[in-house]
Image (cartoon, rainbow, N blue to C red):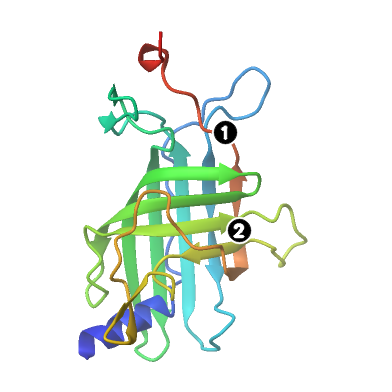
Amino acid sequence: MHLKKIVMLFTVATAATVGTATAVGAVPEPEHGRPEVASVAGTAQVRLTYLADKDIRTFSINAHGVPYTHGPVPGADGRTLPGSPNDATGTVKISHYSAERNTTYTAVGRVDSLMTAPGVATLTAVITQVSPGGPPWVGMRLGFSVYDGGKDAPGHSRDRVGFSWEYADMVKHDGMWGGNEAEIGTSMAPAPFAPVTEGGFTVEHADLLPLPSDTDRS
């Protein structure tokens, strides 16, 4: 029960001690000025619309696409591809200040996939570090989504964030729903349900690139 309480505290929260995401490299820019591959970057605090508390939840994301680099991946026609079009790299940092415990829990993940549409991104990251007392996430892939609402007046944001462990990753056992049990695949995340209260994100949309020429059909 103690572990479940810690996990729930972490999931119902997420805190202000995370710094701005570290740059992970420049996004290629084709001649027409639009990005060749997708990216999402920023830091923001969010609130949960269904829970009023004094906890602080902060997400820092810096991710960009590196298509066809995480292979090998089996192709539908029997060829082996050098990766997937949604391969990505970068960092996700999660921080949660628990008012009840007066403690901040943090986690850091390595981004492995990213997909976008105009103003929207879904990405996944494999967790590599969790601070003492946090949930047992090391080695797990978690899903994130971002809605970039565009430029706002100071102090106001239309951006939103979603994350896979908050009532989204649930499996039913013996008639009871439980969370954080289903495996998260690449680029899988719920809708961005949590409004941003401070900070924000920039999503640079780019369509997924076609197969590399050396794997195209002749």
Residue 99 drawn at (x, y percent) = 42, 88
The residue that disc 1 covers is 207
Secondary structure of the residue carrying numbered label 1: loop
Along the polypeptide, which appears first: circle 2 or circle 1?
2
Q: Rate crowding at label 1 as few (under 14), some (14 to 19) or many (20 or more) other CA atoms within 10 Å.
A: some
Secondary structure of the residue carrying numbered label 2: strand
Q: CA distance from mark 2 to mark 1?
A: 23 Å
Counting labels gives 2
- Quarter of the image holding residue 79? top left
Q: Is residue 144 visible?
A: yes
- Quarter of the image holding residue 95? bottom left
Residue 136 drawn at (x, y percent) = 22, 70
Q: Amino acid at mark 2?
A: Gly
Residue at x 26%, y 74% (from the top left corner): 135
Residue 29 drawn at (x, y percent) = 58, 24
The residue that disc 2 covers is 200
- Quarter of the image holding residue 129? bottom left
